[in-house]
Amino acid sequence: MAKKIFGLILVCIIGIPLVMWMSWLFTPKKKLVIALVDKTVLTTEGQEHISLGWILNHNRYTKTSKDPYKISKDYFGFFPLKDDEFQLKGLERFTTDQLKKLSADADMAYFTDTYGIYNNEWYREGDVNAQSGMLYGGLSNEDLIFLEYMKERNKLIITEFNTIGSPTRAENRKKFEELFHLKWTGWTGRYFDNLDPTKNLEIPKWLIENYKKSHNGSWPFTRAGLALVNDNDQVIILEEGTHVDNALPFIYATPEAQEKWLLPAKTKYPFWFDVMIPNLEVNTVDASFKLGLLPAGKEELAKYQIPESFPAVTRHLGDDYRFFYFSGDFSDNPIRFNSSYFKGVGFFKGFFYDDRNPLERGSFFWNFYNPLISQILEKEMELVSQD
């Protein structure tokens, strides 16, 4: 009897993944031409766009009728090579005519990150969490020209956190804001499970130093908290128990978005985000960040005119143009790309993360980003097929 049970378990262990892989292999390919821009690529793993790559591969989206997207090569931006060598293959090398042609050839554009690469990160000299000179980054003039062409052609545009943050020049930021009717407040934020710098080495030194400059050299925080920093290097700390009852930010989806994009009602988000203010006469907010503020936290935000709730997903899907802005580093999630080769792997998503850990981002990928992007691409594919 024990041998039969063992044999059955063995068949399941081998057979189920095999069936899932075969099912993926025989799923028809779908050509969808995406102009992907990522200027923050430290390794060939392409962490800042790996989540998008996973979804494209899993759903069999291809760049030609047969060729799949490759994370290490199918994008515009910074390309790491061996021995500290690199190539810059962004849109900056394109002429206006070439940008116009790209907008005609591409079905959609996705800007996952324009933060760029800094000298200490690339050359591994000094503290990687300290500020240093920029090697490459920022939303360029050519990026904007391309986005304008895509908007004019009513092609789908997806952008996310740090598309217009530092180091993008103020004039380019303003042009983007005018193009898509939303404004960056200048504030970005991130959750830290422990604000004690002796225990949490993830806290950037520049963040601590900038806070100390305006607080008599003091950094009194030892619990979990939320750090907010603006483009003038001002820093606000909302500490758990003092300013917030729970420092971990949550994203709340509207009922319409839950139905349209298959989003959960509530999702935790422990990574970088920015505080945007959209023109609601033009845009729709599908999901919003909400903080568990205590009276002291509300007072602190009011002091700096920071809203207590702000968009996580902003969209405009009209006859004039189609656009999304994700107010977080949504496409950067620590996922295993190999799992994308197995159809139906989502049924086992609970094995890929521990939701009890406030810092894990696997649950965000599986429960929020994956259904959102999958639904957006599916609807986009329907439109492309009609052309």
Image (cartoon, rainbow, N blue to C red):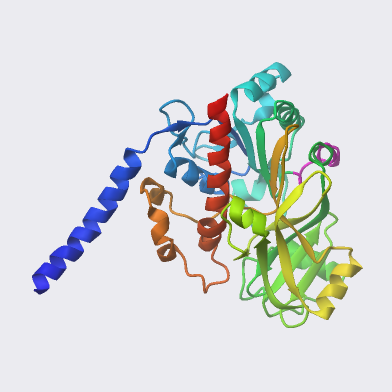
Q: Is residue 186 left or right of residue 350?
A: right
Query: Picture coordinates of residue 249 (x, y %)?
Result: 68, 67
Query: Picture coordinates of residue 279 (x, y %)?
Result: 83, 47
Quarter of image, res 101:
top right
The residue at the far top in this view is 97
Looking at the image, which is closer to me, 224 or 305?
Answer: 305
Residue displayed at 73% across by 30% down: 151
Q: Is residue 27 left or right of residue 108?
A: left
Q: Is residue 93 left or right of residue 349?
A: right
Which segment is the magenta one? 164-175
- Can the viewer see residue 86? no
Q: Is residue 262 above or below residue 296?
A: above
Quarter of image, res 150:
top right
For the N terminus, the image quarter is bottom left
Query: Picture coordinates of residue 194 (x, y %)?
Result: 64, 75
Q: Is residue 264 above or below residue 88?
A: below
Residue 131 magenta: no
For the C terminus, the image quarter is top right
Query: Picture coordinates of residue 166 (x, y %)?
Result: 76, 48
Looking at the image, which is closer to me, 20 or 365?
Answer: 20
Residue displayed at 52% across by 62% down: 363
Quarter of image, res 282:
top right
